[in-house]
Every structure is written in structure tokens, then in C-alpha cells.
Amino acid sequence: MAAATMKDVAERAGVSTTTVSHVINQTRFVSEENRSKVQEAMKALGYQPNAIAKSLRQKSTNTIGLMISDIANPFFTSLIRGVEDVANAAGFNLILCNTDEKPEKEYTYLDVLQQKQVDGVIVAPTGENLDYFEALVDNGFPMVFIDRRLEGIACPAVLADNENGSYEAVSHLIGLGHRRIGIVVGLLGVTSTTERLRGYQKALAEHGLPFDKELVLPGKSKVESGREAALQLLALTARPSAIFATNNQMTIGVMHALHEQGVRCPDDMAVVGFDDFEWASAFRPLLTTVAQPVYDMGRVAAETLIERIRNKGETGDKGGAGVTGKADRAGAKQVITLGCTLVVRESCGAGGAAAATAESIADAGEK
């Protein structure tokens, strides 16, 4: 039988995970009734509070965790490299966890890393498990979000300038004459997806173009889902003359769909991707992409986390009984945003042919 988790205790006691954390660490007042419920649930389940109790220890393990959302995505290769280079130079070992965008795996890995007594964690969050993250922050556990963040959680975050990167890509297409631009977005509910969609909308609005929901397709950040989304866009009566895919995997899927349907890029359809990966220049045509400073994101996230770990040790804040972690929150809401760069290659062409074709199709559909 699997060991009970803090979530199991919370469900049995009928309280939040945060309340369980406060009972374990005595970090905030909890009513006697709820305290008793939690203690009884812990006893009934045989729960050993290793997860949050990690904060009680006095000795560093010189180990940090890195939780990424998709190990198959080349985006994370450079990000991991940036984190590891900084960690290694600072004398820290790295434990890598892959959540596959699954909240249950994320929760399990958070528990595992706590049990391994890591000194801190860098996380690309799934968008769930808010109670657990809040409990960790409340207990002063060093943590940094990367690539995306959780609204309402007081934790530093290192992000790309998703909104502006998207804005620049769509503005480039509009400048080439495109008026109907399809967008394939990533996972809904993730902040990076929201920011990139916002940049798309901003570019349309500033150029006086309408926002058409028909041109917005979810792609789930995977190759096949990008392909399926592109096929749906191609099937529209008034199809777009350009497609903006908001991550590298979906860009590949879009290109597969165009090839399958005999749609020439950029003659019949312009394409811009988000993420500049090594083989973007190996595609024919060469892909125009929004390049994120991925290595630097990893580097800055590791530097930020290690600084927080060391500051915690210097102030004597071990997160034990009576410590809320609030003293460590001076930079807790800090968001470090690194700029993106539009890399123009061949996949947008001069814009005229694809844009004119789309307009003629749209006109025919209206008649």
C-alpha cells in the first residue's frame, strides 16, 4: 500500500492541505477542532509528515530539484543545461523530475523531493496543486517558478516575455499583408498560454483587425495536437493566410499538416513558431520563430533559488515551529522577465501570395 500523503490527510480530515501543514509545523493558529481532526486523520492513516517537516531539519543536502513539464520537448534541454551549470558551479546536485503536465505526478514529485530533503525546487507548474504550493511557501521553503507561474502564490518566477514575443510575431505577419491569422495555442489554464494569446489579441487590436475565435485552436503543446489544429484551420471556408504556432512542438505539427494537404509554405500559407530550436533552420522553408532565452531562463532561475537558499541559512530561518516564512518574502513576488527575439527566416515569405489567396477564398465564401 502506498504511503499516505498530506493530501490524503486533508481529505480525511475535511480540511485544506494548508491547514494540515500549519498543524504539522505550528506555523499559524488552527482551531482545536480542526487540529484534532488533522491529528486523528494522521494517526488513522499512519501518516509520517516528511513532506513539510523537511523544513524542520538543520542540515543542508546541497541538492535542488527541477520539475519540468515535458522532458520530450527540446525547449527543456537548454533550460536544464542552464540550471545544471549554475547548480554545479555552486556545489549543488540536481534531481530532475518530469511531470508530463499531470497534476498528480507533480504532487507526488513534490512529496518525493521533500522526503529527499532537497534545499529548494525550481518548478514549471501544471497550474494545479495550489494548496500544496501555498503550504510550501508559507513554510519558507525556497522555490522558484520557471516558464510559467501560479497566480496568487507568492513565489519568484523567471519567465520569457511571452506577450511581447507573440505581439512581435503577429505584427510581423500583419506587416506582410496577412489579415486572417490562425493561432494554435498551448495548454489552457497555463500562464504562458494566456500571455501569448494576449499578445496575439493586442497585435490584432492595434492594427484594427477583429478577433475571430474561429481562428483560435487549442494545441495542447504537442506535435500531433498542433497537426490536428492546423488541419481544422485549413478546413475553414475562409481559412487563414498565416498560422502562428505558440510552441516548437506544435510548429512541427503544423508543418506536417501543410505537407499532408499539399499546402505550400510560404506560398499558400505563412507560418511562425514560438521557440527557436536547432532544427528550425533545417526545415524547408527555414522557419521564422520567436526565440526565447531558454538557457538564460534556467541560469537565472538557479541563481535566484540558490540565493534564496543561502539567505535562508544566513538568517537562521529553518522554517521550524513558529516560523511562517513571511520574513523570506521580500522578493517572493519577484517576476524576472527575459526578452524574446523574432528570428525572421523564410516561412513567412513576402506575404502577398498567401494573403491574396486567403482573401479570394474568403470572398468566394461570402458570395
Image (spheres, grey):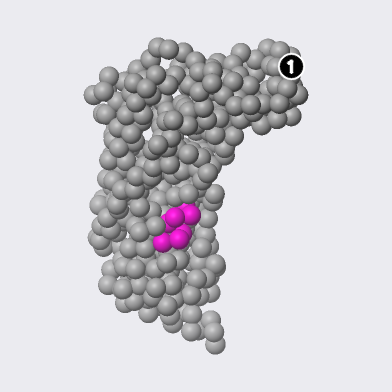
Give 121 or 363, whichever is nearer the viewer.
121
Residues packed near mark 1 inside 10 Å, few (<14), some (14 to 19) or many (20 plus):
some
Q: Position of residue 115 (x, y in %)?
A: 50, 17
- At mark 1, the secondary structure is helix
Is residue 194 rendered magenta in the image?
A: yes
Q: Residue at coordinates 39% horizontally, 68% vertically from top-left?
A: 203
Q: Nearer the viewer, residue 231 or 355?
A: 355
Tell how many labels.
1
Locate residue 122, reporting x and y percent: 41, 32
Q: Is residue 48 magenta?
A: no
**Residue at 32%, 29% in the rendered image:** 307
Picture coordinates of residue 274 (x, y %)? 36, 54
Q: Give whichever of 117, 293 is nearer the camera.
A: 117
Does residue 75 sit above or below 302 in this rendering? below
Please name the amino acid that badge 1 sits on: Glu
Q: Quadrant of the C terminus?
A: bottom right
Measured along the vertical axis of the image, is residue 298 above or below residue 233? above
User: Which residue is rendered at x = 39% and y = 57% of the image?
Assistant: 163
Q: Confirm whether residue 167 shows in the render.
A: yes
Please name the residue that numbered disc 1 is placed on.
40
- Residue 95 location in percent, x, y? 40, 23
Residue drawn at x 51%, y 40% is: 153
Give the residue furthest to the bottom: 367
Characterize the magenta stretch by its predominant secondary structure.
Answer: helix
Q: Which residues are magenta?
A: 193-199
Q: Is residue 116 left or right of residue 37?
A: left
Foreground of the two, 33 or 185: 33
**Image quadrant of residue 40?**
top right
Compared with residue 348, is residue 147 higher up or lower down, i.e. above or below?
A: above
Q: Is residue 1 left or right of residue 167?
A: right
The image quadrant where one finds the N terminus is top right
